[in-house]
Image: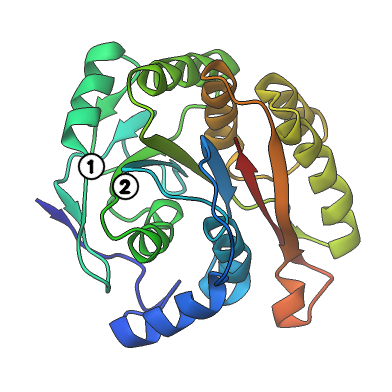
């Protein structure tokens, strides 16, 4: 089974040559990549957030398997839905899904369910896949669509993923998230800084609390919490903010922006 592209031609170019040219511009050349446990990357259209995402991907050595933790924007499917396809289609060629890791995750916890409907149209997952294919054509992926929102469930999911890292060091995570939505740029930066601070401290609980208490419209807080919880349990020692920007830098409208942040966790 192949998961067909759903947002090619909307969020990123559907033409292979055009996409390759864009990725070459967005992913910096000459960076000295490092091995990481996880990263946070935005998931808007490439014209808005692709440069920020590219900076993050350009900083890391992609593992054999990349677990992509995405937001469930459409409300379809299970709370923690593992994609059941064998491949994901991209303009650069198909990317294999790590079925062995998927089976191990299902065996490890009943929190996770195979449910391809959840990811069938989900752009927060799809926009990350061309970056994976471009940066390491041999990498496999394991897409997970997240609708769960209870802190206890997110931390439990992170603990299960951490177990996979203890068994296999050639795995990493991508938490897909945009930051504040449709507020003035100055307000977005102030609120997003509050959310970024606990992420840099690898504090999943504090991130969750901060977003809730300050009503920060960070759409991927659940993927970020899972990634941070898993990374810390797996032995992560630090994090670094690679980029922060907003949609106004492209559109010219700074009255209603979406914030974008890119971080690495090592």
Q: How far across and how far down the image is residue 125, in percent?
A: 40, 51
Closer to the camera, 117 or 107?
107
Q: Confirm or deny contact between disc 2 and disc 1 (CB under 8 A).
A: yes
Q: Would residue 15 be visible to someone looking at this image?
A: no
What residue is rendered at 73% in x and 48% in y?
241
Spatial distance from mark 2 to mark 1, Cα to Cα? 5 Å
Q: How far across and how far down the image is residue 264, in percent?
A: 62, 44
Q: Is residue 235 left or right of residue 110?
A: right
* SS type, badge 1: loop
Q: How far across and how far down the image is residue 104, in percent?
A: 23, 21
Badge 2 is on which residue? 119
What residue is rendered at 55% in x and 72% in y?
29
Where on the picture, by quarter, is residue 76? top left
Q: Would residue 37 be visible to someone looking at this image?
A: yes
Q: How far across and how far down the image is residue 105, in percent?
A: 28, 22
| 189 in relation to 142, above or below | below
Where on the picture, by quarter, is residue 212? top right
Q: Is residue 62 left or right of residue 33?
A: left
Closer to the camera, 119 or 164?
164
| 24 in relation to 61, above or below | below
* SS type, badge 2: loop
């Amino acid at each position: 089974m192949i998961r067909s592209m759903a947002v090619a031609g909307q969020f990123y170019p559907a033409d292979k040559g055009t996409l390759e040219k864009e990725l070459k511009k967005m992913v910096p050349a000459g960076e000295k990549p490092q091995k990481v446990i996880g990263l946070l990357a935005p998931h808007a259209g490439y014209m808005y957030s692709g440069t920020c995402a590219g900076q993050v991907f350009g900083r890391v050595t992609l593992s054999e398997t990349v677990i992509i933790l995405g937001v469930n924007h459409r409300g379809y499917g299970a709370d923690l839905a593992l994609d059941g396809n064998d491949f994901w289609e991209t303009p650069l060629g198909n990317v294999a899904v790590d079925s062995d890791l998927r089976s191990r995750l299902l065996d490890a916890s009943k929190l996770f369910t195979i449910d391809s409907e959840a990811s069938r149209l989900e752009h927060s997952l799809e926009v990350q896949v061309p970056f994976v294919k471009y940066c390491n054509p041999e990498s496999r992926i394991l897409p997970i669509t997240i609708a769960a929102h209870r802190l206890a469930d997110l931390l439990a999911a992170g603990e299960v993923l951490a177990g996979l890292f203890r068994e296999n060091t050639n795995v990493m995570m991508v938490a897909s998230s945009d930051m504040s939505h449709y507020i003035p740029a100055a307000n977005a930066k102030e609120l997003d800084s509050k959310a970024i601070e606990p992420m840099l401290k690898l504090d999943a609980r504090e991130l969750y609390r901060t977003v809730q208490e300050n009503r920060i419209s960070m759409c991927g807080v659940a993927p970020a919490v899972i990634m941070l919880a898993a990374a810390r349990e797996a032995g992560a020692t630090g994090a670094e903010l690679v980029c922060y920007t907003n949609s106004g830098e492209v559109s010219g409208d700074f009255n209603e922006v979406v914030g974008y942040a890119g971080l690495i966790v090592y």
